[in-house]
Image (cartoon, rainbow, N blue to C red):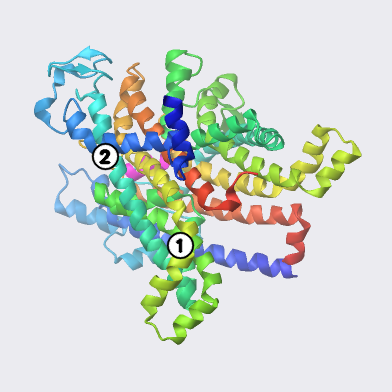
Amino acid sequence: MKTEILRALKKRPYGQVLTVPMIVLATYILLALAAPVIAPQNPYDPLQIYGWEASSSPGTPGSGGYLYLLGTDGLGRDILSTILYGLRISLVVSITSAAIAALIGLTAGVSAAYFGSWVDSAIMRLVDLQLSLPTILVALIAIVTLGPGIDRIILALIIAQWATYARLVRSVALSETNKSYMDAARLMRLPTSRIIFRHLLPNSIAPAVTLIPIEIGHAVALEATLSFLGLGVPIDKPSLGSAVANGFQYLLTGQYWTSLFPGLALFGLIASINFVGEDVRRHLDPRSRPV
Amino acid sequence: MALISVALGRLAQAFLLLLAMSLVGFLGIHSVGNPVFNIVNIETATPEDIRNATIALGLDQPIWHQYGVFISNVVRGNFGTSYIYHMPAFALVISKLPATLELACVAMLIAAPVGVGLGLLAGRQSGTVFDRIVLRSSVFALSIPSFWLSMMLILAGAILTGWFPSGGRGATASFLGQEWSVLTRNGFWHLFLPALALAIPNIALIARLSRSGTIEVENLDFTRFCRAKGLSPRRILLRHTLPNISMPIVTIIGLQFGGMLAFAVVVESIFAWPGVGKLLIDSIQLLDRPVVMATLTFISVTFVALNAFVDLFHAVLDPRVRLSS
């Protein structure tokens, strides 16, 4: 029965969508959405946290009438609940920043290609400057400049990531600007914004779109790293990265669970996004298909 | 002649790049907080003390003036004195450099041969189980956040098994007037885990790159000719395939070596490895502005130098680059 269903799924044109990483990723998103319903505890509510049960090992029964399945951290928060709530913050931060970075990067790249001359050199010198440095360093400089906070970290991630989209979309758009449909649009005296956004952008967007899932994965890792260094989201509302960081000081005393489980969740999230991103690119870009 | 003008042009661009970097960094550090409060004791200082300290540090001047003073000092190799350590900031950064350098070198000495080897073997037999394992695990290796990888290495290698120390630099030996951990047995044990943490993502990156390069080259006529000539597979792989895929690999090794300086920030903080990265994070948290500026400038200079070095190396490795430039 099961194999029949699987075979039927594989036959459908979009059967390839149902890969293992895709299912894992969908589960992550569902868990994040359902966190307030399924989490045994609200880790942001001090009334639900029992301080004397701090650093309980996995499987200890708690006073709230539930089991600390993955143990508690140094403040007495249930690790499982912290992971579920942290997942929401990690996903919101990374998806928001990747989307806005894509929007800014695409606009900048297409404009650079369309206008050329000084607009092009101004935008592309900035892009070159950023891409010549590792993303983590750019994000680090940005967050040091902006200070801590969730809105700031989103901004820092946008600053760190827009340039990748800009360079890719510009290189495609440059070859599009000379094509005859662009000449036609210009001859029809369409408004510049309409030419850029309705004609040039849709025709040069494809390679950049395949970047988005991969960049979301990068954003999750970057946010986690910055939070780990104490430069990211505030400690009372931990993302997955700061949840791992909270556990670091307890690691050396052998309390592995405070950093192991949030880190595993983070690793699984990034890995599933990266696998999905690679699949997306392989399907959409025939050149990267393995021989 | 043409080569010289290209090199000069690149150098000029690099300087502009550095100037922009320094301006961004300067404004950034400036907006974080007032460093005067790190110098004076907040509880006992009178407004008079604070004013005197502000004037002594030159923080009462307008920001463009501070930047002008800073740039003219930087040109003379003077970044000012650390607010915390009370020693010249640049000398402080340089004193931490050997630790970071040996960490990055050992990591690359692990990553490059292992990565290239895996990539060559996987690429030669593409589509086999081995190839798929290499490809899959490379995605996993690139997905592990480096801080969590470091912590798990501490957990597995130090806390659970006790094989390696969990942090610090261990015993060092003196060589060329600097202290090196890699020269002593104890120091090398301390070095191993952080170097592995830096190496693992790079192994994956290099392996993927050499795999795709190998697949491309193995389908070209000259490798078929080599095979027809009856050369051993190992000789084809090492003497004919490897030199032909070396360009992108050398590029990525050069650039990742710089990237290691950036990722050392994370790894050094976790392993309490007293290098440039740990200094940067500590200085950011202590608002030690001269040291942050000196560190950022130093890292960007290193990047520019590495980029130039990689370009020059291209010209040596590939005659086509020499001709076109």
**Magenta region: which residues?**
B279-285
How far across and how far down the image is residue B319, in percent? 78, 58
How far across and how far down the image is residue B46, in percent? 14, 49
Nearer the observer, A191 or B75: A191
User: What's the amino acid at mark 1?
Assistant: Ile
Q: Is residue B86 magenta?
A: no
How far across and how far down the image is residue B290, in percent? 39, 51
Q: Which residue is rendered at x = 77% and y = 48% of the image?
A: B220
Q: Which residue is rendered at x = 20% and y = 36% of the image?
A: A236
Q: Which residue is rendered at x = 37% and y = 82% of the image?
A: A191
Residue at numbered disc 2: A88
- Residue B19 in view in this figure: no
Work out which quarter of the rendered image holds the C terminus of chain A and state it. Answer: top right
Image height of B86 relative to A53, above or below? below
Residue at numbered disc 1: A205
How far across and how far down the image is residue B227, in percent? 85, 39
Work out which quarter of the rendered image holds the N terminus of chain A and state it. Answer: top left
User: What's the amino acid at mark 2?
Assistant: Arg
Question: Crowdedness of circle 2 by 10 Å Cα count: few (<14), some, many (20+)?
Answer: many
Q: Nearer the viewer, mark 1 or mark 2?
A: 1
Q: Chain of mark 1?
A: A
